[in-house]
Amino acid sequence: MNISCSHIIHKNKDYIELKFDYNNTINQIIREFSFVKFSASRKAWILPKNIKQFQSVVEALKGKANIDTSKLKLSTNQQEQEIKINHYTKINDYNKKQLSIYLKTLILKGYSKSTLNTYKNEFAIFLQSLKTVKADELTTDRVKNYLFYCHDELQLSENTIHSRMNALKFYYEQVLKRNKFFFDIPRPKKRLILPKILSEDELSKLFQALENKKHKAMLFTAYSAGLRVSEIAALQLQHIDSGRMQMLIANAKGKKDRYVALSPILLDILRDYIKTNKPKPKKFLFESDQTGEAYPTRTIQQIFSNAKRKAGITKELGVHSLRHSFATHLLEKGTDIRYIKDLLGHFNIKTTERYLHVSKKQLVNIISPLDDLYLKGKLKL
């Protein structure tokens, strides 16, 4: 099997493209990496132009494919990759310098890679629309007109407009230091989307559909403590404290650590999984057998989808519904919403109020809904 690698620009971003004749084994290996995506338009796998990520894919494919890297020129400087702007050909040279300053400010302020990429893309789209106009010379009224254009002509969603406004607000208030530049620019009201949850009976069917012990341990972990899929993937063995019966969720969303209760039932499940799994995990609780790195979030999402389909559940929801179900079931059992806020790691109580905060003195007394499901006889281990 020969794999041709080349550098491409796709949707204004730098990528490495992997092209080869269809091979199910190679596809399964590549799917393990969350940063690799399949482009339907190019009919090829693509990943960011990042030497470390690319090398991890090459390592996983050793002995299974011949990889031609002769056309690639990779930089080892990650920040250089982050702030590369030459491919934004529709942005005038003056505004390209503004984009470079903008990205450097984001990096220096320690914004996450996800936020950095979102802000970069939204700001770049804005700069492209300006053509020859200098971004730092725009008035509040001009920005208002642009946002009206986004709403009226482009018919962007409320969430997309909010995201673009946040990116512009950062430029004018954080980079250019124009205090309250956005003070009188109204934001569109966001649609309140209620969380989608699974009933206890549906959860029972979902869990019974899982046969693989690692897969079962992943989804049980998600529901037992209300974790995000990224938090499941990032869990390390050292984060499981069976002595204090708690788990450390380190560097979660917003760069925030928190502790959550370790369900006794989950502890038994994790011990059984670790005892029987080959190879045994060394650093991360759930490791890819191919790479030894953290399990890709996209694979965890696929595990949930497969189990849902096998269980005959037709609701349109994803693995995040386990987090929603955890919060909702706790609320229905009378748990104070302020406890739930802390367990979920929310910054603002308004976020938790979608399910309908407090001192942590009784946190350890909260029984996981996973244990409750077991006590009701709706769960077989």
Image (cartoon, rainbow, N blue to C red):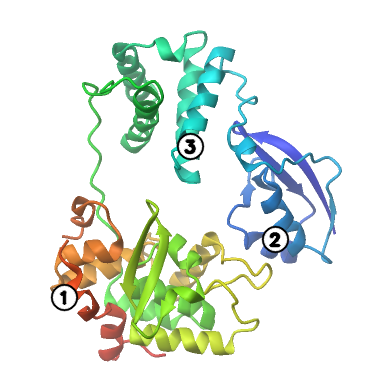
- Alpha-carbon neighbours of circle 1 within 10 Å: few (<14), some, or many (≥20)? few
Q: Position of residue 187 (x, y in %)?
A: 25, 29
- Quarter of the image containing the N terminus? bottom right
Q: Position of residue 54 (x, y in %)?
A: 71, 51
Q: Earlier in the sequence, mark 2 or mark 3?
A: 2
On screen, residue 301 above or below 149: below
Q: Amino acid at mark 3?
A: Leu
Say if residue 81 shows up in the picture. Answer: yes
Q: Nearer the viewer, residue 270 or 196?
A: 270
On screen, residue 167 above or below 130: below
- Alpha-carbon neighbours of circle 3 within 10 Å: few (<14), some, or many (≥20)? few
Q: Nearer the viewer, mark 2 or mark 3?
A: 3
| Residue at mark 3 | 108
User: What SS does tag 3 mark?
Assistant: helix
- Alpha-carbon neighbours of circle 2 within 10 Å: few (<14), some, or many (≥20)? few
Q: Amino acid at mark 2?
A: Asn
On screen, residue 191 above or below 318: above
Marker disc for residue 27: 2
Check if mark 2's residue and mark 1's residue have beta carbons within 8 Å.
no
Q: CA distance from mark 2 to mark 1?
A: 44 Å
Say if residue 121 shows up in the picture. Answer: no
Residue 195 is drawn in which quadrant? bottom left
| Residue at mark 1 | 333
Which residue lies at the image location 40% right of the left edge and 53% below the top edge?
255
Q: Earlier in the sequence, mark 3 or mark 1?
A: 3
- Quarter of the image containing the C terminus? bottom left
Which residue lies at the image location 34% right of the left edge and 82% below the top edge?
245
Q: CA distance from mark 3 to mark 1?
A: 44 Å
